[in-house]
Amino acid sequence: MSVNKEVKRITVHTLRRMKSKGERISMLTAYDYSMARILDEAGIEVLLVGDSASNVMAGHETTLPITLDQMIYHASSVIRGIKRALVVVDLPFGTYQGNSRKALGSAIRIMKESGAHAVKLEGGIAVRSSIKRILKAGVPVMGHLGLTPQSIYKFGTYVVRAKEEEEADQLRRDAKMLEEIGCFAIVLEKIPSKLAKEVAESVSIPIIGIGAGNDVDGQVLVTHDMLGITKEFHPRFLRVYLDLYAEIKKAAQSYLQDVKSRDFPNEKEQY
Ligand code: KIV
């Protein structure tokens, strides 16, 4: 695997160039300094401070409870860990829907207080005015369509979205609209791969998929899922690269045993 070392800092323009050259974009979530540092060093181009922190960091059932203050805390920790990656931060539920002034205020707080490079928010036409206002202030925006977890109580389930023509058509229109108003990229979550391919071919901005097949411009996964830290989550789209849950548990059990048996610390491990 070769990482493009010529690129110093990844910007929204880098991503656009990558799409035009057919170079795939890698994106993973990060919520803390230590993980961000590892992922950045590994060469991942985009780190997403996702509101999935609500699930994997805080143990909530949905992404809805996480607050703007909490997202800013996670984002500023991530920013301190990176040298190269573009850091995108989710605007949490309730901080941008319905009121574009409030949306701008939320985006500005994220940019000012965390040092992040861009924001992401869920939805199409319903949040158009919020996105326009944020963009007008000079803040890059990534869209998010398809399965949008902040709307889980409207959907009722986490099943594949846009299988029916009506919803697929709306998604096509939303993607075009997001491109036209100036979003720099769009995440498409859990939609049929044929539809994702069609959308990726119809817009000039990068389409980053999660559960959207291989014919898009890049992929994103929740880091805790692909490292096997989360346990009860096995969607078809997920590739698990490590069983870190078992590894960490094994290490903790070895430590426990060493403490109980008084093996730790030994002579060399003390002053
Ligand atoms: O919050 C998140 O992790 C996300 C990804 C699933 C795209 O939005």
Image: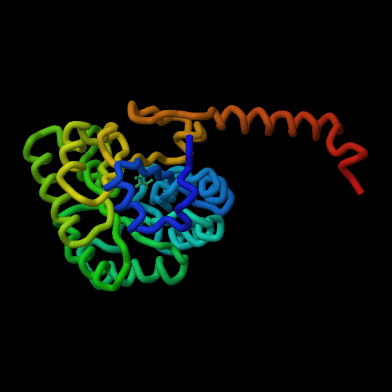
Q: Is 14 left or right of 196, judged from the image as shown?
A: right
Instruction: Point out the residue furthest to the left here.
Output: 166
Q: Residue at x 68, y 31 (%)?
A: 251
Residue 129 occupies quadrant:
bottom left
Q: Is residue 242 visible?
A: yes
239 in relation to 156, above or below: above
Q: How far from the left and from the top, in percent, is residue 150? A: 29, 49
Q: How far from the left and from the top, in percent, is residue 93? A: 31, 56
The color scheme shown is rainbow
How many marks can you see? 0
Between residue 11 and residue 49, name the one nearer to us: 11
Q: Residue at x 34, y 42 (%)?
A: 23
Q: Residue at x 45, y 53 (%)?
A: 7
Q: How far from the left and from the top, in percent, is residue 27? A: 40, 45
Q: Is residue 91 visible?
A: no
239 in relation to 268, above or below: above
Q: Is 226 left or right of 91, judged from the image as shown?
A: right
Q: Residue at x 53, y 58 (%)?
A: 77
150 in relation to 158, above or below: below
Residue 256 occupies quadrant:
top right
